[in-house]
């Protein structure tokens, strides 16, 4: 069964450094998302991406964050200058073309980001 | 704010019994509802999607939706130890973000 793949599985970075998290969505999916989950807390939406542009973003997704689809397969999340509170699991998700009802989002295994 | 409320648990159910998980949501305009299962340290895994009032069954799982009461539930029949996990209720508006609840921890005791 097709799946969303994320790399790396664990990223350790010094505070203030830039980090790029990578995702390969399911190949025929058109909608892409990033979520994060701080340890012990709920899964929170960061950003959605469709047709090569951001379609929605949360208040968490400030100027330090950016997303990109540099080619036909990868979808990346960049954090420009990491802070301690950016430590979390980051999940990429994708979904198929949306019709009259929302198509379920399928999640990757996540990247655990640890900021020192 | 489009909130989703769940009892955090833990909910302890004997093996072989029915586990009942409940969820309420605040956004009357929501059309799509999902149940995800999340094992500790892992990603959310889709179990069920439901869009219309009533019941939807898939194997040992039954999702129930009542839009008038803004209520979604998940029943797990013949509970197995492998069902022990956190169950996330979620809803989605169109093609936009999923709003997750905090999850209910389910423990199946042998």
Image: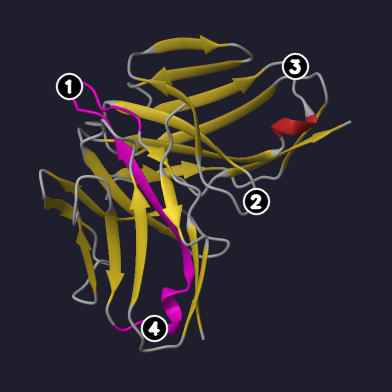
Residue in the image at 20% along x and 45% along y = A72
Determine the residue positioned at 66% across, 45% down: B9
Q: Name the mark on residue A83.
A: 4
Separation of disc 1 and disc 3 at Cα?
Answer: 35 Å
Q: Which quarter of the figure has residue A2?
A: top left
Q: Are marks 3 and 2 in contact (CB under 8 Å)?
A: no
Q: Which chain does the residue under circle 3 lie in?
A: B
Q: Which residues are magenta?
A: A81-104
- Is disc 2 on the same chain as disc 4? no
Are callouts 3 and 2 both on one chain? yes
Q: Which mark is residue B78?
A: 3
Q: Which of the numbered marks, if any, corresponds to residue A114?
A: none
Considering the numbered disc 2 on the image, is that residue within a helix, a strand or a loop?
loop
Marks 4 and 3, how far apart at CA: 45 Å
Q: Indicate which disc, 4 or 1, sits on the residue closer to the N terminus.
A: 4
Residue B110 position within the rendered picture, expressed as x and y whole percent measured from the top left: 89, 31
């Amino acid at each position: 069964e097709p799946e969303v793949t994320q790399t790396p599985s664990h990223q350790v970075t010094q505070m203030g450094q830039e980090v790029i998290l990578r995702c390969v969505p399911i190949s025929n999916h058109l909608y892409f998302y990033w979520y994060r989950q701080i340890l012990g807390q709920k899964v929170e939406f960061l950003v959605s991406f469709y047709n090569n542009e951001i379609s929605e973003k949360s208040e968490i997704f400030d100027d330090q964050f950016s997303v990109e689809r540099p080619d036909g397969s990868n979808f990346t999340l960049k954090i420009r200058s990491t802070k301690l509170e950016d430590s979390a699991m980051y999940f990429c998700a994708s979904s198929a073309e949306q019709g009259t009802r929302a198509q379920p989002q399928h999640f990757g295994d996540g990247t655990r980001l640890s900021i020192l | 704010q489009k909130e989703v409320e769940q009892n955090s648990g833990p909910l302890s159910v004997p093996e072989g019994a029915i586990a009942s998980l409940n969820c309420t949501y605040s956004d009357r305009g929501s059309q799509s509802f999902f149940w995800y299962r999340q094992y500790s340290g892992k990603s959310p895994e889709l179990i069920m999607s439901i869009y219309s009032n009533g019941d939807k069954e898939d194997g040992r799982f039954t999702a129930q939706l009542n839009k008038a009461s803004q209520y979604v539930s998940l029943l797990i029949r013949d509970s197995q130890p492998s069902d022990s996990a956190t169950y996330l209720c979620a809803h989605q508006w169109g093609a936009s973000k999923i709003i997750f609840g905090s999850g209910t921890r389910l423990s199946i005791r042998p």
